[in-house]
Image (cartoon, rainbow, N blue to C red):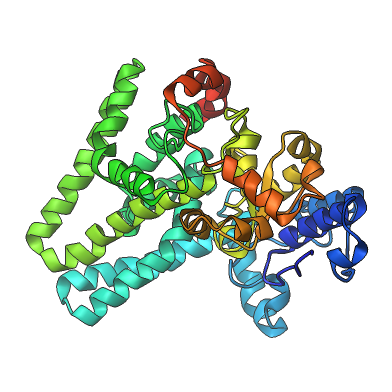
Amino acid sequence: MLTPINPCLTEQDQTLLRNLHHDIRKNARSASPSHLGKPQEGFHDDERSEQILSNLNDEASSVFQPTVFTTWDHKNIPKPIDRYLIQPYTKWAQRIVRRPTDVVFLTHIILYLTTSVPSAIYLYYRFTWFHAIFHWMMQAWYCGPFTLMLHNHIHNNGVLKREYTWLDRAWPYLLGPLMGHTWNSYYYHHVKHHHVEGNGPGDLSSTIRYQRDELLHFLHYVTRFIALTWIELPLYFWRKDQRSLALRTFASELSSYAFIGCLASVNLRATIFVLMLPLILMRVAMMVGNWGQHALVDEVEPDSDFRSSITLIDVPSNRYCFNDGYHTSHHLNPRRHWRDHPLAFMKDKSRYVDGRALVFHNIDYMMMTVTLLRKNYLHLASCLVPMGDQIGMSQTEIAEMLRTKTRRFSEDSIRKKFGTGRADKVEHLNTAST
């Protein structure tokens, strides 16, 4: 049965999900109409859906709206507030951000600079346990959107216009440690390493050597990253004969730890809540998320971007974290702008079908990981949005199909399945980010 579309989804997600539901209704072959539920209004064929998604991103279109906030859409803002506050702010912000769509990035930079920074400074001036706990909870709430904003920054050499390069270069260094990031390490690990190796055998955060629905394997995966990434990543670059990158990565990690140590000597309690706990939380969260992104790996073609990553159409990933759910689209083109992912999916839908890609809704990466570790494949099956040959499969068949995607790869299987050209294949996509 088709589940109702969550009204809290972005307009782009709702449009895409209606289109996929339209395909299911059109192509379902083994189910009677009653199994598909009542018809829903607004089903879109491919041409109509592509036009809607294109217009939403076209500045010349009458329906174009920049993203100003993640929580509220333009239609939800009261007209007086919109006219006298939001519209003047938007016009001013569009003179600063690189793309007119991205007012939200400046909104978040201002938010963090006016809340996280003063709060952290005041904790060092006058520490209280209530303030410390509140500060850490605030940072925990901020860290997801911040990280995905930083994600856009590192893939596209910034988010602001050239005249504001000083701010564009400064905010990651100032805000990053408060959100649990060590200086530059996200760029080195994610852009220069993960997107080169693509969850293959050379990827330090690869999931393929783990049984991806086993708790002990997951704990080993997270613990190894937290304990050893500071040395494993520089050694990876050193082995690849990228000596300068290895030294810069090592220096970034050590300088970040030295900075934390210096502040701890000034005020240990404040440093625990301002820098140490966010660092631990971020590194755990990044591995939980990466596990969810790359837990379902095809046993036949594990080096395919379509078969080694997934797409999520959900509220936390796409509304609050800048379309982070479109992970397959991101791996296909790491420099693709975040607002372009739904349209790119729509245009490439046939490739997703042919590639037997997996698309889910109403579940985020964190819950994907939790659900896999609970081995609740029937719930995952209920979240799958079937495409192509998946349409018509029963929930049990889908659950068993998903179970096969979590099996650990042996070293012999890795040698047979993975070629040696993976890094060469995608390196050109990242050279412009240096």
| 428 up-or-down from 10: above or below | above
Res. 350 visible in picture: yes
**Residue at the left extreme?**
265
Q: Position of residue 72 (x, y in %)?
A: 63, 73
Query: What residue appears at the point 31 percent right and 77 percent down from the top-left corner?
Result: 134
Q: Nearer the viewer, residue 134 or 382?
A: 382
**Residue 259 placement, left or right of 361:** left
Q: Residue at point 40% right, 65% down?
A: 112
Residue 94 shows in the view = no
Q: Is residue 237 above or below residue 278?
A: above
Query: Is 8 on the left or on the right of 184, as rendered?
Result: right
Image location (x, y in percent) of residue 298:
60, 35
For the residue pair 365 and 150, the one nearer the viewer reads as: 365
Quadrant of the rendered image containing residue 109 = bottom left
* Residue pictured at 69% horizontal, 84% vertical: 80
Q: Nearer the viewer, residue 210 or 190?
A: 210
Residue 415 location, x and y as percent?
48, 18
State the image coordinates of residue 332 (x, y, percent, origin top left): 63, 34
| Quarter of the image where the N terminus is located | bottom right
